[in-house]
Amino acid sequence: MENTIKKKSRTVTRRAFLQGLGGGAAGAALATRMRGQNAGAGQAGIALPPALAQKTITFTVNGKSVSVDVEPRETLLEVLREKLKLTGAKKTCDRGECGGCTVLIDGQAVYSCLFPAVRADGRQIITVEGLAEGETLHPVQQAFIEKDGYQCGYCTPGFIMSTVALLGQTPSPSLAEIKAGLSGNLCRCGNYVKIDEAVAAASQKMRKA
Ligand code: FES
Ligand code: FES
């Protein structure tokens, strides 16, 4: 179920997302231009079209309630990184292809670069920054360290979040299930063997705990 939902969210293409904002590239260009004019328009007392106006959303991120003003064009990844300064989720491809931006939304692994921020209203978000408890790393984080589940480490936050989601759904995955569960994450260093070992080790740790 989890993977189905995850894959569903991945079927939201950037094109569809932009079209949803009104007219694909033209809509995006208009949104960008209007954003640049926001200050001037506000000073001149000119109301922005409702579709481009900011909206205040409230959601929980890593256990804390936050309220933030967002524009319809903003993604959850942009809000997390640029407004909340949570930079663990990476902006790598920014088009739903690599998994570097994976976060949990209500327990499901989702590409935050494709997720409109306005849709985060009322949701529970967990980023890689929210996994450790004080100085104690999450078992998945610990397993990635112990099994050398990273090289450059750029893909690692995304892999860790997908692993947390996978093990939440399938506590004792087979190798095939690990590969399927992490199939939405890419590692340019090609460290897949070690990553699979880290996931298996995390699974063991979590079942013993
Ligand atoms: S940055 Fe989101 S999938 Fe690559
Ligand atoms: S460890 Fe470098 S991209 Fe995965």
Image (cartoon, grey):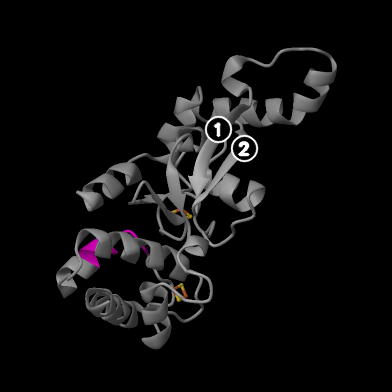
Q: Position of residue 136 (x, y in %)?
A: 47, 76
Task: Based on the picture, tell me whether residue 131 belongs to the magenta stretch.
Answer: no
Left or right: where 176 falls relative to 80: left
Badge 2 element: strand
Quarter of the rendering containing residue 126: bottom left
Task: Say which amino acid is labelled 1.
Answer: Ile
The residue pinned by badge 1 equals 57
Read off the magenta span.
179-185
Dot 2: within a 10 Å radius of its alpha carbon, few (fewer than 14), some, or many (20 or more) residues? Answer: some
Q: Earlier in the sequence, mark 2 or mark 1?
A: 1
Q: Residue at x 47, y 38 (%)?
A: 120
Q: Quadrant of ligand 2?
A: bottom left
Give the camera-side residue of 149 and 124. Answer: 124
Secondary structure under the numbered disc 1 in the rendered image: strand
Residue sitting at x 33%, y 43%: 9
Q: Position of residue 130 (x, y in %)?
A: 49, 61
Residue 142, x across and y down, in percent: 41, 80
Horizontally, is 120 left or right of 56 in the view?
left
Is 33 or 155 nearer to us in this picture?
155
Whether residue 195 is situated above or below residue 6 in the rendered picture: below
Q: Residue at x 63, y 26 (%)?
A: 54
Q: Which residue is mark 2?
A: 68
Dots 2, 1 in contact, CB < 8 A: yes
